[in-house]
């Protein structure tokens, strides 16, 4: 299904390329640092506007993303969400900054955000303090699997994956005058993974599905450097290693001791010797042990 977004943003003509030379979309990346848990957000610059993919975690990063968009001198047309973890939607309020710009997500992503937002705030606001945005904006436009949104000749097609890294994942495939895959946290490229939602089996299946979608196009992950489809194979290896090590340590139990979580962290850092999101290794251990039980 293809929908032309001719009435969902104000102050810009959304349909039709600029007169004269065709404009090839330009993709700008905002890469958060450690305070924003290394989350990526992207701005796709079209001929007369900007489409954002995800919105960062913290107040500082979301304001920086908004400033990056403003510096392009073109209006924001839409914000597309890949999934419902706070490091990808928390900053939407600062980014939108105006009425009439749609915040677009699948029904599953929308449900996850609305269901979990208050609990996530209770869990993480003590850690992030004033950097946790006081106001979060929930999706205003729901799209369905394979629905396509076309803005100025650039088409974004959503693929609803269901549970995976989060309780509901999706990827956005850009086509038209440029091709790219925005895969959210289906891939955390060379960054330790969040597995606390307990869907690692489904995540592995999603990697197979997405691998077929992104062949021969640039891949833009939710964390880590953009690259090519090969990063999905690396993510699969990481998850398989994690499940193997958790299973070995748990020995059929549904949780790990603190000492076992420390051992798990050491083993995973043998595969990926970085401290980027190292805290997630132990954080997700019990969820995966329960999943494997």
Image (cartoon, rainbow, N blue to C red):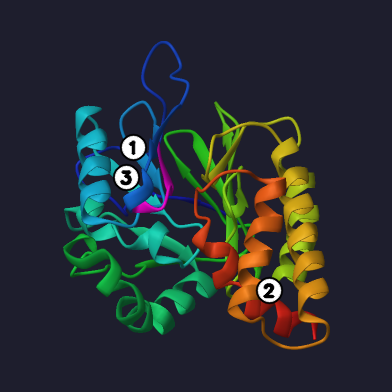
Of label 1 and label 3, which has the lower sequence position?
Answer: 1
Relative to the observer, which residue lies in front, 5 or 52? 52
Marks 1/3 in contact by CB < 8 Å: the verdict is: yes
Q: Position of residue 142 (x, y in %)?
A: 46, 68
Residue 60 falls left or right of residue 195: left
Circle 2 packing at 10 Å, graded few (<14), some (14-19), many (20+), is: some
Q: Residue at x 43, y 47 (%)?
A: 38
> Does the rendering let one see residue 168?
no
Q: Which mark is residue 199?
A: 2
Q: Which residues are magenta?
A: 36-43
Secondary structure, mark 3, is: strand
Residue 289 falls left or right of residue 111: right
Q: Position of residue 127 (x, y in %)?
A: 29, 68
Circle 3 packing at 10 Å, graded few (<14), some (14-19), many (20+), is: many
Q: Residue at x 39, y 30 (%)?
A: 46
Q: Position of residue 128 (x, y in %)?
A: 26, 64
Residue beneath disc 1? 50
Secondary structure, mark 2, is: loop
Q: Which mark is residue 109?
A: none
Relative to the observer, which residue lies in front, 193 or 42? 193
Residue beneath disc 3? 77
Q: Quadrant of residue 41?
A: top left
**Relative to 154, is 253 above or below?**
below
């Amino acid at each position: 299904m293809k929908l032309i977004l001719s009435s969902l943003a104000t102050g810009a003509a959304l349909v039709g390329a600029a007169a004269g030379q065709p404009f090839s979309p330009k993709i700008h990346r905002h890469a958060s640092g450690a305070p924003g848990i290394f989350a990526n957000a992207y701005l796709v610059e079209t001929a007369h506007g900007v489409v954002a993919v995800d919105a960062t975690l913290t107040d500082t990063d979301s304001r920086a993303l908004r400033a990056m968009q403003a510096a392009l001198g073109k209006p924001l047309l839409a914000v597309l969400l890949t999934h419902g973890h706070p490091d990808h939607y928390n900053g939407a309020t600062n980014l939108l900054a105006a009425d009439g710009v749609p915040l677009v997500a699948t029904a599953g992503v929308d449900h996850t955000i609305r269901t979990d937002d208050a609990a996530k705030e209770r869990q993480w606001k003590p850690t992030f303090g004033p950097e946790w945005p006081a106001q979060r904006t929930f999706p205003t436009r729901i799209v369905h699997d394979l629905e396509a949104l076309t803005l100025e000749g650039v088409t974004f097609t959503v693929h609803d994956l269901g549970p995976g890294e989060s309780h509901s994942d999706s990827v956005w495939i850009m086509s038209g005058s440029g091709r790219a895959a925005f895969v959210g946290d289906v891939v955390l490229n060379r960054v330790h993974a969040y597995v606390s939602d307990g869907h690692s089996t489904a995540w592995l299946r999603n990697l197979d599905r997405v691998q077929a979608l992104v062949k021969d196009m640039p891949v833009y992950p939710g964390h880590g450097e953009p690259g090519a489809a090969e990063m999905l194979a690396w993510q699969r290896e990481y998850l398989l290693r994690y499940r193997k090590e958790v299973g070995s340590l748990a020995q059929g139990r549904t949780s790990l001791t603190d000492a076992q979580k420390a051992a798990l962290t050491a083993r995973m850092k043998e595969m990926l010797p970085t401290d980027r999101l190292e805290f997630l290794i132990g954080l997700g251990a019990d969820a995966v042990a329960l999943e494997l039980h």
